[in-house]
């Protein structure tokens, strides 16, 4: 089987590499200095202005949202075409965010493009695509082995015209970032369903919803990963409208396979 890149894909590789070499790498020290200064002042979870300037420059250059396949919102690259761009970005820790191609936003944006209602897309997808806000994905729980998401215990219960969400999540990547304004939460809407992979659903939760508490940032191998972070988040009687459910009840695993 031949894996041939199109001329457009090759040109994007050249342009991304050039941007990383000439614009991002020379600014790595300035970015680190901003975060280090903020950490020394007592709070490393800031919005580094070095990053915001680089994002604006990448967007102006048309090197933006490169991850979205078959979409009018992104570059429309296949996984084969996008892979070498990921390799280039992966050489520099801050590079993927510069191009608005960093997790968990990429997976969340793909999810919202494919499964969210037009109203949810207007409210949350558009500012994510513009790089104006960031997001988090809340799945992992401290009490269970969450790598198998059938084990999760957080609940999403329908009450009238709302869903009520309760649970404790941790290592929720991005939740500690001050720009994080929305989460996609995975919980159980039908815990007694004999089909284990139909018990779970995904739902959109704005971070400022009453009952959402960012408890702490969690360190991984001694690192806080600021200003992105991995947070412990508690959800206590969090209420969101019915239209915040993605695709429908019991379809969380279906979404997970598609994102």
Image (cartoon, helix red, strand yellow):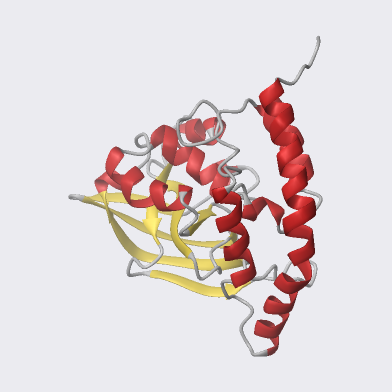
The answer to whether residue 191 shows anywhere in this view is yes
Q: Nearer the viewer, residue 70 or 136?
A: 70
Residue 83 in the image: state x and y as whole percent. Answer: 73, 33
Q: Residue furthest bottom?
A: 41
Q: Residue at x 49, y 30 (%)?
A: 254
253 with respect to 24 (left or right): left
Q: Nearer the viewer, residue 123 or 141?
A: 123
Q: Residue furthest left?
A: 160
Q: Is residue 121 above or below residue 182?
A: above
191 with respect to 62 (left or right): left
Residue 72, image quadrant: top left
118 with respect to 226 (left or right): left
Residue 164 in the image: state x and y as whole percent. Answer: 31, 56
Assign the C terminus to one quadrant of the image. top right
Q: Residue at x 71, y 59 (%)?
A: 94
Q: Is residue 78 above or below residue 253?
A: above
Q: Is residue 83 above or below residue 28?
A: above
Q: Nearer the viewer, residue 140 or 21?
A: 21
Q: Residue at x 72, y 49 (%)?
A: 19
């Amino acid at each position: 089987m031949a894996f041939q890149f199109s001329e457009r894909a090759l040109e994007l590789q050249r342009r991304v590499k050039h941007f990383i070499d000439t614009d991002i790498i020379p600014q790595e020290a300035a970015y680190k200095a901003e975060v280090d200064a903020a950490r020394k002042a007592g709070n490393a979870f800031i919005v580094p202005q070095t990053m915001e300037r680089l994002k604006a420059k990448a967007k102006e250059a048309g090197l933006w949202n490169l991850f979205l396949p078959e979409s009018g919102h992104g570059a429309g690259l296949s996984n084969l075409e996008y892979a070498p761009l990921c390799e280039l970005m992966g050489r520099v820790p801050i590079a993927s965010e510069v191009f608005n191609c960093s997790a968990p936003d990429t997976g969340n944006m793909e999810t919202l493009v494919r499964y969210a209602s037009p109203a949810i897309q207007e409210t949350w997808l558009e500012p994510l695509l513009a790089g104006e806000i960031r997001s988090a994905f809340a799945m992992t729980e401290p009490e269970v082995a969450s790598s198998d998401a059938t084990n999760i215990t957080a609940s999403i219960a329908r009450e009238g015209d709302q869903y009520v969400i309760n649970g404790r999540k941790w290592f929720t990547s991005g939740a500690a970032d001050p720009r994080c304004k929305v989460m996609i939460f995975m919980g159980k809407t039908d815990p007694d369903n004999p089909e284990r992979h139909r018990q779970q659903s995904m739902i959109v939760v704005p971070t400022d919803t009453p009952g959402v508490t960012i408890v702490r940032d969690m360190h991984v191998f001694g690192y806080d990963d600021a200003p992105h972070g991995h947070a412990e988040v508690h959800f206590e009687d969090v209420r969101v409208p019915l239209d915040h459910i993605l695709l429908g009840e019991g379809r969380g695993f279906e979404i997970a396979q598609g994102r």
